[in-house]
Image (cartoon, rainbow, N blue to C red):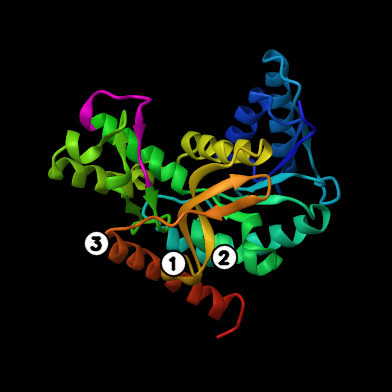
Amino acid sequence: MNKKRVGIVGVGNVGATLAFTLATKDICSSILLKDKRENITQAMALDISQATNAANSKTVIHACLNDEEFKDCDVIVITAGLPRKPGMSRDDLLLTNAKIMISVIKSIIPHNPNAIIIIVSNPLDAMVYTALKASNWSRNRIIGMAGILDSARMAHFIFEKLGYGQGQIEASVMGGHGDDMVPLTNFSTVAGVSLNEVLSKEDIEDIVNKTKNGGAQIVKLLETGSAYYAPAYSTILMIEAILSNKKKIYPCAIMLEGEFGFKDIVSGVPIMLGSNGAEKIIELNLKEEQKIQFSKSISSVKSLITTLEEKIFNTK
């Protein structure tokens, strides 16, 4: 096993699930946990460490109680932030979580100069923008996990509609992680067969609507939190691609610098993930309707960033 180190900031439901699953997969040598709640950090480290022994995993878990201990990570995942609650939009979380994100970034970057950072905190696209602004790092090193999750949700709803094809469904979603995400039905397949050939237009529209509300549906059912198994596993796919230099293509949130006709804005697009983080952006040939939808999604993120610039970064 290679000597790779993964850090996780925030050990709530997503962070703890991520740490547990990652530890039992045995793909990194150590996992560092960091959370403002020291007792929770220590408890999770102890519990997951015992799980690794049951799984015969060589991964070692550390509870970090100060900034100096949380160091030399190859990949850092940030899940810290106020959780989404029923009736709360991702936008409601913006200013509080932006302040938390800036604090986390300032505390971790001095001791982790070579890390690739994966953002999971919401509102996702705005938090990636905040982390980039606070760190002044290049865009390939700070990316957001959302597109994989949204695509997985879409794949589930396709299976739910069809009743077959589990494990053979490839769904594709791009755009912001919110109500204006853009499910790409023409890039989605079942065992290689286009979605348009196996489902009616009405069924596809229903799948698109369910995908957009997939997270909110779980929030409503849980009443006290949001999804964590699917977000955690989606993040692990990104970690694996980076640690193993797999050059896998996944939809992830990244700062655009002219791609798809947009600049200085974060959005979910297909990127190639390797040891240098986001190594390439794959520009899809979108239909006119999809271009309009993507532009709308960009506008939603822009409104959040305008608020950040005015109230957090004081540049406007």
Q: Residue furthest bottom?
A: 316
Mark 1 Cα shell of 10 Å, populated few (<14), some (14-19), many (≥20): many
Residue 305 in the figure: left or right of residue 172: right
Q: Most prominent secondary structure in the magenta stretch?
A: loop
Secondary element under disc 1, as helix, strand or loop, is helix
User: Would residue 306 be visible to someone looking at this image?
Assistant: yes
Q: Position of residue 216 (x, y in %)?
A: 36, 47
User: Residue type at mark 2?
Assistant: Tyr
User: Residue type at mark 3?
Assistant: Glu
Between the residue at mark 2 and the residue at mark 3, the CA separation in whole angstroms equals: 26 Å
- Residue 129: which disc? 2
User: Would residue 225 be visible to someone looking at this image?
Assistant: no
* Above or below for 175 versus 12: below
In the rendered image, the quadrant that contains the N terminus is top right
Residue hosting label 1: 301
Secondary element under disc 3, as helix, strand or loop, is helix
> Does residue 166 show up magenta in the picture?
yes
**Residue 43 in which image quadrant:** top right
In this orientation, which residue lies closer to the viewer: 99 or 165? 165
User: Which range of residues does the magenta coloring cover?
Assistant: 161-172
Residue hosting label 3: 289
Between the residue at mark 1 and the residue at mark 2, the CA separation in whole angstroms equals: 10 Å
* Mark positioned earlier in the residue sequence (3 or 1): 3
